[in-house]
Amino acid sequence: PPAHSRRDWIGPPDKHSNLRPVIFYVPPEESALERRLREARQEAQASNQRFWARHNRAFRQEKEEFIYSRLKAKGLEMRDESGQKATLNAEEMADFYKDFLSKNFKKHLQYNRDWYKQNFRITFLMGQVALVRALRWLRRRKKNVEQ
Amino acid sequence: GLFVWRLRNTGARQIPCRLVRLYHVASYRLITFQYFNFLKRMYVTQCNKDLSQRAKPKSDSIVSAFHELQQLDQEKKVVHKISSVSPVHQSWSEMSSRNELREMKSAAETEDSVIAGGAESKEDRQWKEMKLRLDDLPGILARLSKIKLTALVVSTASAGFAMAPVPFELTCFLLASLGTGLASCAANSINQFFEVPFDSNMNRTKNRPLVRGQISPLLAVCFAASCGIPGIALLTLGVNPLTGALGAFNIFLYTCCYTPLKRMSIANTWVGAVVGAIPPVMGWTAATGSLDAGALLLGGILYSWQFPHFNALSWGLREDYSRGGYCMMSVTHPGLCRRVALRHCLALIGLSTVAPVLNITTWTFPVISLPINLYISYLGFRFYRDADRSSSRKLFFCSLWHLPMLLLVMFTCKKSVLEKEDKGELRGGSHEMAMEIRLP
């Protein structure tokens, strides 16, 4: 994002976590409230990024391992004669999906709780910041009118 | 029949792309496929640089996916009305292509199906300023409120209104529709507000406004409040308190029960089916002011219909569900998934037979609807027995036309308690239910 920009910028989805990173603009006259908001958003972004990157990596890895072990059991190689990667069909993968979901169930429950808390907190702070800004703007207008 | 698809080429990797949205700049090309001859792998052709806005006439029936994975993050219920044949095909293709793209993804079995953005348009790869542009706002809000799904929900509510055995009142009808639409917008917005990181990880939903940062969460909540509160107020004060209460309850059920439950237990599917069943009940209570057997029957029909529809759809999306952490029957209890789908197909036959008993329709209704109900039950049985992609797809596609047809037949077999003039008024008054066929 350009150096002179006075706004936040959002980027393309991350390769591992599929989340879009945000670069936050720090205004020189940032109030304490605004700083709390920005820090909350940065923290949430970092922790979400960590979670999903790790989670998706684990998924891909375990999926590979599963395919490998199943192919081995069937007596096939990972790549066939033409060099194409061998895959299992959906029904065979179903066991893996079920397994993966149940293995990560508790992890997801915990993440859900954290995510909801983050989301509410950030939105509430946004509301407060917006309110303060609106009041400030109104006060400025009143002063202009009086002058 | 022919389906018209929009797919995008991604160069070397032939990953089917998502459907182009109305305001989005994208490149695509139309491809036509034979309906019942789907190959396992769909091949995409090149794209051209055309930008065309697809204007859909409002009277078109569109079927939306249940559970957008939104998973399918799950979107919601499907509702539909058919007004004529060709728009139906086109709308089926839209709908099904959206679903199909997801299905195709799992069918293609690419390991990298989780790569978001991938070969999307250049714009997607760039860094964007997080600034709200006013001229983009209508499009953003339309996507936030899932406007197409809302339109379908409103049409099921109007179906409920139309089936009620009372004289048709236009103002009441319009107020009820508007109130239901606003309530649906509010519920959908809150749903998207809750599901941002999950939506980012699912192909179907990764282009939603909150995911892309086009709108702030605060604005999304304000929008939801500014739709929901007037919507419910309109229903309570302008129609009747019962309808308002149902509307408020439905919003609560969808946002606070269904959405979190999706990640906790498979019971979400049943809750979601209730959410889909309530709009026609609301339409009925708007017309009559009371919750009687007819309302419950109509709700029951929609409730039962959700299962073959959603369970068949979710069969092809197991990978995304598993990775996204969604608890769906198709992943955790596949046998149950198919049993429930079949059970509810059969229930539809039963419910259709109850309709004349409750004096909602004549006895011609169960007779005429029997073929389509039997057909969907047959596909449900095939799905139960074969448990593969092709049977799930067949069942899903059948459900797309089954419901509009059933509602249409129901309406034509409606027991005319009142004079014929009311029937005529009904037909003229509701553009969403354009009747192309003659009454028997």
Image: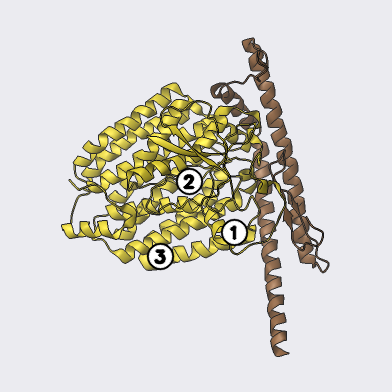
Q: Nearer the viewer, mark 3 or mark 2?
A: 2
- Please give the chain letter of the residue carrying mark 2: B
Q: Are marks 3 and 2 in contact (CB under 8 Å)?
A: no
Determine the residue located farthest toward the bottom in the rendered image.
Answer: A147
Query: Cα distance, mark 3 to mark 1?
Result: 24 Å
The residue identified by callout 1 is B220
Circle on res. B236: 3
Quadrant for the C terminus of chain B, please. Answer: top left
Residue depicted at x 42% and y 22%: B385
- Please give the chain letter of the residue carrying mark 3: B
Q: Which chain is yellow?
A: B
Circle on res. B76: 2
Q: Secondary structure at mark 2?
A: loop
Q: Secondary structure at mark 1?
A: helix
Q: Nearer the viewer, mark 3 or mark 1?
A: 1
Which of disc 2 and disc 3 is earlier in sequence?
2
Q: Which chain is brown?
A: A
Quadrant for the N terminus of chain B, please. Answer: top left
- Left/right placement of residue B156 relative to residue B254 reads left
